[in-house]
Amino acid sequence: MNEPRLQDSTDYHKLTGAKREVVWALVSFLLALGVMYSIVKVSNSQVSGEIPLGKRVDYTK
């Protein structure tokens, strides 16, 4: 019984067509998401200094 080999696959060496577009769209989306996360994290960095960590804060006052 012959086992299928990876080299026998049609897209072993490169992606073509719709698969390539999906991969590039996913990579672009993840890069954009990372950039947006970094921007938001940097712009909200002053918030962590306002609320002391580990202490109880009474917001009703």
Image: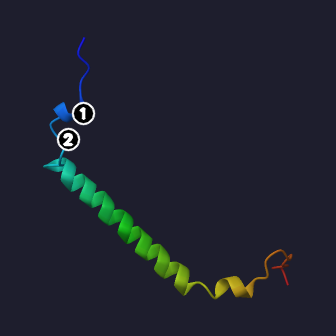
Residue at point 20% right, 41% down? 12
In space, the residues marked 1 and 2 are separated at their CA atoms by 7 Å
Q: Left or right: where does residue 15 sit relative to residue 39?
A: left
Q: Which mark is residue 37?
A: none
Task: Report helix, strand or loop for mark 1.
Answer: helix
**Amino acid at the residue labelled 1:** Leu
Foreground: 6 or 58?
6
Q: Quadrant of the C terminus?
A: bottom right
Crowd rating for badge 1 (residues with CA inside 10 Å; few <14, some 14–19, many 20+): few
Q: Position of residue 28 (x, y in %)?
A: 30, 65
Q: Which mark is residue 6?
A: 1
Q: With respect to residue 60, does 8 lie above or below?
A: above
**Amino acid at the residue labelled 2:** Tyr
Q: Position of residue 22 (x, y in %)?
A: 24, 53
Q: Position of residue 36 (x, y in %)?
A: 43, 75
Residue at point 24% right, 28% down? 5
Tell me the residue that label 2 is attached to: 12
Residue at point 24% right, 33% down? 6
